[in-house]
């Protein structure tokens, strides 16, 4: 499929999605949000795709936020709709995707950009990356899940400070906070993420999708994470991947997971 604001590339059983609006520092306008949803849904439906890397075009930004020019004159109702629709069609969607999504944070990840990186399953950054939720400097608050996911990832006090100051943190701080898992040079960022994605691709994609569900369940208020884990654990026993994984171990050979 062709997109106006994205580049989707396949590399064997891995895919890279690049948000491609470098002149606007890859700011998320509505069209880009819809295209991202389409691209993730399509890649998730491709059985051979085992992991997805999300990054931004150019050397300056991952995503510098929601596109401010689109909502500058919105009403209260329009503001609510903007946040609700965005959360549903993209941010929650990515978080709950069966296929693992790694955010390769290659520069500014601000506002909706950091919110998008936080909706991914984990994050790796390049040395030049800067992260923050500057919304209160615009008279608004994070609306794409930032007030929820940032405290989950770095703790309430740190999140409060970052949100209230509208400040940006560098990668040393982000690493220290656990907001990113690793920091590498800009040239190494995609190769490094591909290396992790390849490790992921060696494992059972079915088990990974159950693991994503079980981990996410622990962060939902209306769901018991331990019960979700028991349910998902049990379901694994009915999969061809489980039969293959355990047989391969007992036969001392490498597993070749059918992905079912
Ligand atoms: N929405 C819309 N356009 C944006 C944008 C955003 N979130 N972030 C950057 N842009 C645009 C700029 O308007 C500029 O466009 P122009 O060349 O047509 O004027 C272009 O991207 C380059 O940005 P610029 O501000 O000139 O780059 P810089 O290097 O001086 O500053 C930032 C970089 C990231 C510090 C600055 O762009 C910024 O503060 N962006 C907004 C961040 C933000 O508040 N995000 C949260 C939104 S809720």
Image (spheres, grey):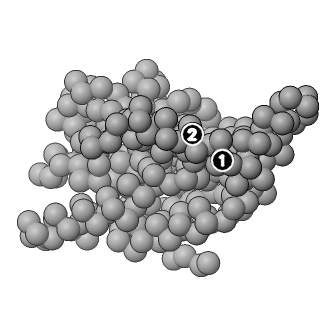
Instruction: Kindly identify which numbered label has been placed on residue 234.
Output: 2
Instruction: Say which of 215 and 185 sits in front.
Output: 215
Measured as percent of width and height from the top left, residue 22 is found at 48, 62
Figure check: 215 above or below 27: above
Q: Is mark 2 on a helix, strand or loop?
A: helix
Using a 10 Å C-alpha cutoff, classify the residue at mark 2 as few (fewer than 14 neighbours), some (14 to 19) or many (20 or more).
Answer: few
Instruction: Say which of 249 and 194 sits in front.
Output: 249
Using a 10 Å C-alpha cutoff, classify the residue at mark 1 as few (fewer than 14 neighbours), some (14 to 19) or many (20 or more).
Answer: few
Q: Does the residue labelled 2 lie within 8 Å of ligand 1?
A: no
For the point 15% across and 70% down, the residue is 78
Measured as percent of width and height from the top left, residue 249 is found at 83, 30
In this rendering, does residue 201 appear at all?
no
Q: Is mark 1 within 8 Å of ligand 1?
A: no
Figure check: 71 above or below 206: below
Q: Which quadrant holds residue 169?
A: top left
Q: Is mark 1 on a helix, strand or loop?
A: loop
- List the residue tagged with mark 1: 238
Measured as percent of width and height from the top left, residue 241 is found at 73, 46
Instruction: Kindly identify which numbered label has been placed on residue 40.
Output: none
Whether residue 177 sits left or right of residue 133 in the image: it is right
Instruction: Say which of 218 and 30 sits in front.
Output: 218
| Quarter of the image with the N terminus in it | bottom right
For the point 22% across and 37% down, the residue is 163
Q: Which quadrant holds residue 189?
A: top right
Measure how far apart labels 1 and 2 are at the Cα level: 8 Å
| Quarter of the image with the C terminus in it | bottom right
For the point 31% across and 58% down, the residue is 87
Measured as percent of width and height from the top left, residue 43 is found at 61, 64
């Amino acid at each position: 499929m062709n997109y106006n604001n994205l580049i989707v590339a396949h590399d064997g059983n891995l895919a890279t999605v690049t948000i491609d609006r470098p002149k606007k520092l890859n700011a998320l306008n509505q069209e880009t949000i819809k295209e991202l949803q389409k691209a993730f849904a399509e890649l998730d439906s491709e059985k051979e795709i085992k992991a997805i890397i999300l990054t931004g075009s150019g050397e300056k930004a991952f995503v510098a936020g929601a596109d401010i020019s689109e909502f500058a004159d919105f009403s209260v109702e329009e503001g609510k709709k903007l946040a609700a629709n965005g959360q549903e069609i993209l941010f929650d969607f990515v978080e709950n995707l069966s296929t693992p999504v790694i955010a390769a944070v290659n520069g500014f990840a601000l506002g909706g950009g950091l919110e998008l990186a936080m909706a991914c399953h984990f994050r790796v950054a390049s040395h030049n990356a800067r992260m923050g939720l500057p919304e209160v400097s615009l008279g608004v608050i994070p609306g794409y899940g930032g007030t929820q996911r940032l405290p989950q990832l770095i703790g309430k006090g740190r999140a409060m400070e970052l949100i209230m100051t509208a400040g940006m943190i560098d990668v040393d701080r982000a690493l220290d906070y656990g907001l990113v898992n690793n920091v590498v040079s800009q040239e190494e960022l995609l190769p490094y993420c591909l290396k992790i994605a390849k490790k992921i691709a060696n494992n059972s994609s079915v088990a990974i999708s159950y693991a994503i569900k079980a981990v996410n369940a622990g962060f939902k208020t209306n769901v018991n994470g331990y019960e979700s884990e028991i349910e998902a654990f049990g379901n694994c026993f009915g999969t061809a991947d489980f039969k293959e994984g355990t047989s391969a171990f007992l036969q001392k050979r490498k597993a070749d997971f059918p992905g079912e």
